[in-house]
Image (spheres, rainbow, N blue to C red):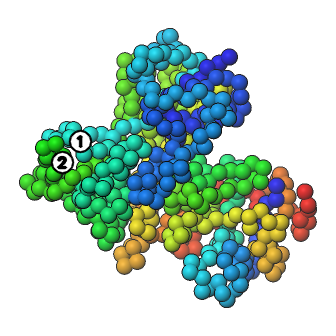
Amino acid sequence: MKQLYYKVDKCLGCKSCEIACALAHSLTLELFKVLKEKTLSMPRKKIIVCRGKNYPISCRHCKDPKCVDACMAAALTYDKEKGMVIHDDSRCVGCWMCVMACPYAAVRPNIKTKIPIRCDKCKDKNELACVKACPTGAIIWQEEIAMQPGTVPDEGSNRKR
Amino acid sequence: MRQFVIIGNSAAGIAAVEAVRKKDKESKITVISDEDYPSYCRCLISYYLAGEAKEEKILYRPESFYKENNIELSLNKKVIRIDPEKNRVICEDKSQMTYDSLLIATGSSPKIPDIKGIKKSGVFKFRTIKDAKDIEALLPVVKNSCILGGGLIGLKAAYGLKKRNIEVKVIVKSKQVLSQMLDFESASLIQKRLEENGIELVLGEDVMEVIGNGDIKAVKLESGKVLGSSLVVVGKGVSPNIDLIKDTKIKFNEGIIASNLMQTNIPNIYTAGDVCESFDITSGEFSLNALWPIAVEQGRIAGANMDGDNLSYEGSLGMNSIEFFGLPAVSLGVYKVKADNGSFEELKVLDAKVNLYKKLILKDNFLIGAILIGDIKNSGIFLRIIREKIDVSPFKDRLLQENFGYPDIMDFVKVKENIYV
């Protein structure tokens, strides 16, 4: 299963990933037209600046997802095969239990759409918008490896399964 | 072959069934429910009433769930007694069932105040899909309604009715709504939002009588005031459904006492969800914390342990997340302390103009509770800090800052991840 890793020291905090993410989830997929869309597309990823470093935050697709447990509408499910937490918009009522439950604050409420904002791994595309947009290669999309603390993932190896 | 009996077909019961079936495809599982409906999202009945959630969307699991998981589902059956000596449950219809391992996940029922006229037809509880449907069936002839109680259930009923263009007055004994999860300041923001959207609140008043010959006509308040109303919904809290164990040796207080294994004091009888009292990590006492996510967690642990695991539950805490008319609110743990109690520290941000309120309650630099209105994005982080008992000293000044987030706590959490390199 592929996962996202971040080289924090390489992250400039330029928010290219945020913009690319919002764009990839818009209707028009065109940067300047996006701003005119009726419901503004929101980035699923956010950069948080902490102690002088930039940390991109987005859904981890936890194997033991607290948000799925918390979802009182059964809109969230865990897809074992895809290794993803899947959200069924048509079931969601916008109660924000998932926001309350997420231990990373990686799920944010979109009050306008009443649908939580969270990473969908670009709907399981092979290349993610944020990875593609990152100018410094700080975002790594690769097969999950059982890393020992302190191990550095193999940069840019993006191995195919 | 072992026989599991699960009493209760909602959050805790289903989580338990799924936990058992994860490893054990063989044992017999019987799920008993006193409702006439496969498992559904109970908390969605207000959205159903509002017309925002369709009936087919509120099933918690697909109808094929029971067959696929080889579960015998027994609907419309009420267990009235448990006989731990003979390992059997006795139902209202006199039928009996024996078990090797039993889960009591019977949930809770609305408390009905003892006032004149409360039994008249037109007075409804708001707990089951049947309640919602019964209310819905009357809507064409209802113009105005009264809700008894300003708690979550009362307000959700009010929301549902208002969305169907019924006039709604909510009668609240306390001086604020949601007194079980919000303080006065935060409640006033919610109240303003409700009132702006046409829900009338009558605070500091109690209903003394439901008036009407046959059909309901009005409710009479403590002050003597009479409010016209042809529909009444009772939202005065819930109490655990423990009648079935009252003459057994199973220990209970308000709810059934659950050990950290979600076991009762009888080894092959487990309990989970609204019916049980579990260790509350913010108060250090056994408490009822009747909430969907907690029921799921507890049910999963109970189910796994019934099937031979030895999982320990870290404990529950009072929490909730709601949204009314676009204003979200989250309450976690201890949400109110007496102002003169010096051992607690409050960090607060209030900007009523933009409906923003954040309050954190600390004790010796440990977070024990929070209220968040308007901006709830960090509620999961605060919940984690409470649950994992993280000392906030290193980042205390950042807690309420806009840019506070997971990176601030990542070095202090129990399970470290390795995605930042």
Callout 2 amino acid: Ile
Q: For the point 63% across and 38% down, which residue is it? A: B65
Q: Can I make out residue A43 in this image?
A: yes
Q: Chain of mark 1?
A: B
Decide which of tag 2 and tag 1 comes sooner along the chain: 1
Instruction: Using residue B390 as the reference point, say whether residue B186 is left or right of it.
Output: left
**Foreground residue among A153 and B102:** B102
Q: Is residue B345 above or below residue A7?
A: above
Q: Which mark is on residue B216? A: 2
Callout 1 amino acid: Ser
**Foreground residue among B160 and A104:** B160
Which residue corresponds to mark 1? Answer: B121
Q: CA distance from mark 2 to mark 1?
A: 7 Å
- Circle 1 sits in a helix, a strand or a loop, which is it? loop
Density class for disc 1 (Cα within 10 Å; few <14, some 14-19, many ≥20) is few
Q: For the point 29% across and 44% down, which residue is it? A: B124
- Report the quarter where the N terminus of chain A lies: bottom right
**Foreground residue among B41 and B339:** B41
Q: Which mark is on residue B52? A: none
Q: Position of residue A14 (x, y in %)?
A: 71, 82
Q: Position of residue A152 (x, y in %)?
A: 85, 62
Instruction: Using residue B93 as the reference point, say whether residue B56 is left or right of it.
Output: right
Q: Residue furthest left?
A: B224
Q: Position of residue A40 (x, y in %)?
A: 59, 79
Q: For the point 67% across and 71% down, which residue is it? A: A45
Q: Is residue A50 above or below residue B134?
A: below
In this rendering, do the residues under marks 2 and 1 share a single chain? yes
- Report the quarter where the C terminus of chain A lies: bottom right
Q: Chain of mark 2?
A: B
